[in-house]
Image (tube, helix red, strand yellow):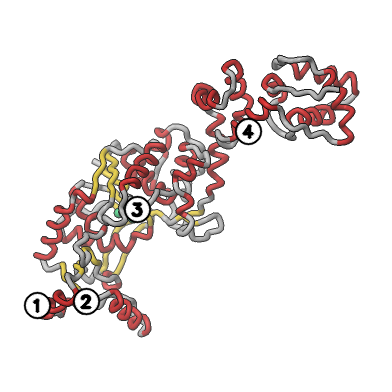
């Protein structure tokens, strides 16, 4: 049974980087007919906010990434305490009392001597009396997991074989001085107890994974299959870490990006497979293969979402947008034609309003000096409305005969005069929708 999880911390809105993680875990579970868990990593009571939990669910729902169940770390603290006790009993857990300033100093010294800044395990040599004295002075210490100094090796689903020397990694702090259980332990306990079989997350977690493998082994669990996807960069390869805040899913949604566009891009970006618009989740699931993803940093350009959104909108039947179009005030008898006319000329649904305003109020005519007489003559020939889809053809034929103009010289000035724009939908369809406000006199 395949079990995956998406494990966001509810300390902010989820962004495209998180989506990559969520989507890969979702697709793996769905492809295998397994279970996809939404795990809320809320062991930090100060930074975790309920509004972000709701927002995460709303964003995943919007995308159609439905989870099978929700788990919350804040409700499983007793499980973590129990695991901590077991680590203590087996001598793999020790209390350390260094202040952040002291640790910083140690690191600087090590770096100065050209050594890796790894915690020196000074706390292991403390006697019970020394610990009591430190505890009385500084309060409870942090609890560190004692790594076995050997190589930690795993076959990563994206990175291939990874081998990390545990001696080059500091013994991880799993419990803070104030008793707060940290993610590294909570995540291991959850993954073990929930039977998680596959963990996909960002490559910023690679060192975590190494230490987590030893913790899982110490606790007698089964190590899941790990895969670490590369981090997203901007279009020029620049770091996105500071900009990810502006690439939240809700910002993209507010900009009119459609779920199908976002899913189609993120399910393929950074893989050897081409990016194609997929409007059916089943196809995304079927076509997903994690081994196709590259370990190289993946360039992400939010602008790529707009052509995909436009293409998706072109596939929509009128019924899917009817409410939105009626809400603009488009009369019922013109609404379907309005959609046919505009759907190939919008990037997002927000662009519909501009078109409707133009049809309703008429456009500011654009008429070149040398076309003035021609446009005036043509307008005089335009029959009174209402117009239908035949009107344009009949009218321009008449104008052609009367003025001798043809081709672009005939059509372009009329399009510009009627719509104010050099491009747009078929004029034969535009005319019946357009309120032609003709200058009198
Ligand atoms: N809460 C962790 C994060 O957001 C989860 C990492 C993991 O998938 O284990 O980074």
Return the residue nearer the eye: 352 or 397: 352
Residue of label 2: 121
Q: Are marks 4 and 1 in contact (CB under 8 Å)?
A: no
Residue appearing at x 22%, y 51% in the figure: 74
Residue of label 4: 354
Q: Earlier in the sequence, mark 4 or mark 1?
A: 1
Which of label 1 and label 2 is nearer to you?
1
Q: Residue furthest front?
A: 441
Q: Is residue 292 above or below residue 144?
A: above
Residue of label 1: 128
Q: Position of residue 56 (x, y in %)?
A: 36, 44
Q: Earlier in the sequence, mark 3 or mark 2?
A: 3
Q: Position of residue 390 (x, y in %)?
A: 73, 15
> In screen coordinates, is 179 left or right of 234?
left
Q: Earlier in the sequence, mark 2 or mark 4?
A: 2
Q: Are marks 3 and 4 in contact (CB under 8 Å)?
A: no
Residue appearing at x 32%, y 80% in the figure: 105
Q: Are marks 3 and 2 in contact (CB under 8 Å)?
A: no
């Amino acid at each position: 049974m395949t079990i995956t999880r998406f494990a966001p911390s509810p300390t902010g809105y989820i962004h495209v980087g998180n989506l990559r993680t969520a989507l890969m875990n979702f697709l793996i579970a769905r492809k295998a007919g397994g279970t996809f868990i939404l795990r809320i990593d809320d062991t930090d009571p100060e930074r975790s906010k309920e509004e972000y939990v709701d927002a995460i669910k709303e964003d995943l729902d919007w995308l159609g990434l439905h989870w099978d169940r929700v788990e919350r770390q804040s409700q499983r603290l007793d499980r973590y305490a129990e695991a901590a006790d077991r680590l203590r009993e087996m001598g793999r857990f020790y209390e350390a009392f260094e202040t952040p300033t002291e640790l910083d100093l140690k690191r600087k010294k090590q770096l100065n001597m050209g050594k890796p800044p790894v915690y020196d395990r000074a706390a292991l040599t403390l006697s019970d009396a020394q610990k009591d004295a430190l505890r009385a002075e500084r309060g409870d210490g942090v609890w560190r997991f004692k790594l076995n100094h050997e190589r930690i090796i795993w076959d990563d689903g994206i990175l291939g074989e990874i081998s990390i020397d545990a001696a080059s990694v500091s013994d991880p702090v799993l419990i803070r001085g104030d008793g707060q259980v940290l993610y590294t332990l909570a995540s291991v306990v959850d993954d073990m107890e929930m039977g998680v079989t596959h963990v996909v997350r960002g490559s910023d977690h690679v060192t975590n994974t190494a230490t987590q493998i030893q913790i899982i082994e110490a606790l007698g669990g089964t190590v899941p299959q790990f895969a670490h996807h590369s981090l997203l960069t901007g279009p020029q390869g620049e770091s996105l870490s500071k900009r990810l805040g502006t690439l939240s899913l809700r910002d993209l949604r507010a900009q009119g990006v459609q779920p199908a566009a976002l899913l189609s891009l993120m399910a393929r970006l950074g893989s050897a497979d081409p990016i194609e618009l997929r409007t059916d989740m089943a196809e995304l699931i079927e076509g997903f293969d994690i081994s196709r993803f590259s370990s190289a940093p993946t360039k992400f350009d939010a602008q790529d979402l707009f052509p995909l959104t436009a293409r998706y909108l072109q596939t929509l039947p009128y019924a899917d947008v009817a409410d939105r179009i009626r809400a603009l005030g488009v009369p019922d008898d013109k609404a379907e034609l309005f959609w046919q006319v505009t759907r190939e000329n919008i990037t997002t649904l927000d662009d519909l309003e501009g078109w409707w305003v133009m049809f309703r109020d008429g456009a500011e005519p654009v008429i070149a000096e040398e076309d003035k007489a021609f446009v005036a003559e043509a307008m005089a020939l335009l029959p009174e409305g209402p117009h239908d889809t035949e009107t344009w053809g009949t009218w321009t034929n008449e104008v052609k005969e009367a003025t001798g103009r043809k081709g672009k010289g005939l059509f372009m000035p009329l399009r510009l005069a009627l719509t104010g724009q050099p491009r747009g939908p078929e004029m034969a369809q535009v005319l019946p929708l357009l309120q032609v406000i003709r200058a009198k006199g």
